[in-house]
Amino acid sequence: MGSLDLPSPICHRLKSQQPIDETSLLNLFKSQQNHLNYFFKNLDLTQTLSFTQTLLNSRGTIFFSGIGKSGFVANKISQTLISLGIRAGFLSPVDALHGDIGILTANDILVLFSKSGNTEELLRLVPCARAKRAYLVSVTSICGNALAGVCDMNVHLPLERELCPFDLAPVTSTAIQMVFGDTVAIALMEAKNLTKDEYAANHPAGRIGKSLIFKVKDVMKKQDELPICREQDLIMDQLVELTSKGCGCLLVIDEEHHLIGTFTDGDLRRTLKASGEGIFKLTVGEMCNRHPRTISSDAMAVDAMKKMESPPSPVQFLPVIDQQNIVIGIVTLHGLVSAGL
């Protein structure tokens, strides 16, 4: 069989690749670190403080805009501010010229991210935004750019060079933009004295929010879901109650529903091993734990989990009682995990 002559384009696609070794990869990370250090060493803090104060004093919405990779960064920073309870948004420079600029008002700030400061789409957006009387801020890395000359304020982000060997792919510049934007966001968070509870209120579906918002009463089982019995009940008569409620225990109560103790499936196994057939005559009250860990319904759910995991040994549930020691519910480790805590 003769040799296969591949068409030129295919030959190009089959160009040999250089293997990546540990040393070359480490050198790239060190180079990126050096480029970022250049940014930190040369950033004008006075200029940055003025920018941060301008955002803090905003009476309207802080909009961010950019094209390409800078656009992704601008969008992300706007989302960070929103999550902190700060009115912000992303305004696409392309969509803005087709109607979206209608959202802009004289009370708003428009922050334009661009490495070069000569991005055509942003330059076209400026006169339109100025007609809406918004305050314009450019965030750029190349000195003497066009965008800085037409905005009310410019923030210079010092860029030594891109990590790309051709100094073209925007990888260092976007990293700098992200670090800058997110750091300013946290400065605003501190200036506004945002509390942990306020932050959690903005993240109700996440684990952070759940751990700071959910209380035991929000995740506990109650009423018909409770595996309850009396202390005089025979252990063997309560097996269905012990196994059917999915709690792995019995809550032993008196006639007024005061908690007397708990009897777990572990207690059942130990009692059976120690007593043999004698278990048929034993009552729950004789073998229950009369000093179980308990918790109130108003306690934080995350505190319930910590209490379950505390020494001397972890437990899988906590009876929930009121101030009169009356059983009103039960919270289980499985229930907490299912709730995303």
Image (cartoon, grey):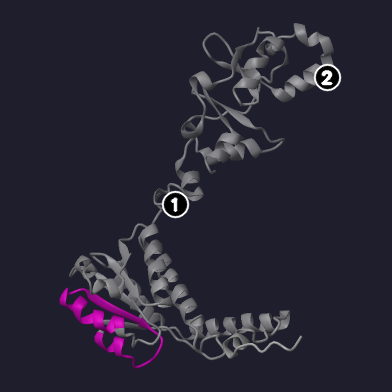
How far across and down, in percent of the image, does residue 149 sit? 27, 89
Residue designated by label 2? 273
Q: Earlier in the sequence, mark 2 or mark 1?
A: 1
Q: Tell me the quadrant of the picture where the N terminus can be found.
A: bottom right
Segment tinted magenta in the rendering: 121-150
Residue designated by label 1? 196
Give how far apart the Cα atoms at labels 2 and 1 are: 50 Å
Q: Amino acid at mark 1?
A: Lys
Residue sitting at the far front: 1
In this rendering, the label closer to the viewer, 2 or 1 = 2
Q: Secondary structure at mark 1?
A: helix
- Residue 340 visible in the shown view: yes
48 falls in the magenta region: no
Quarter of image, res 269: top right
Q: Tell me the quadrant of the picture where the C terminus can be found.
A: top right
Q: Residues within 10 Å of mark 1 (few under 14, many from 20)?
A: few
How far across and down, in percent of the image, does residue 150 sit? 25, 86
Q: Amino acid at mark 2?
A: Lys
Quarter of image, res 43: bottom left
Q: Is residue 63 left or right of residue 8?
A: left
Q: Residues within 10 Å of mark 2 (few under 14, many from 20)?
A: few
Q: Is residue 3 left or right of residue 150?
A: right
> Residue at horizontal 39%, vertical 63%?
79
- Against 105, residue 51 (above or below) is below
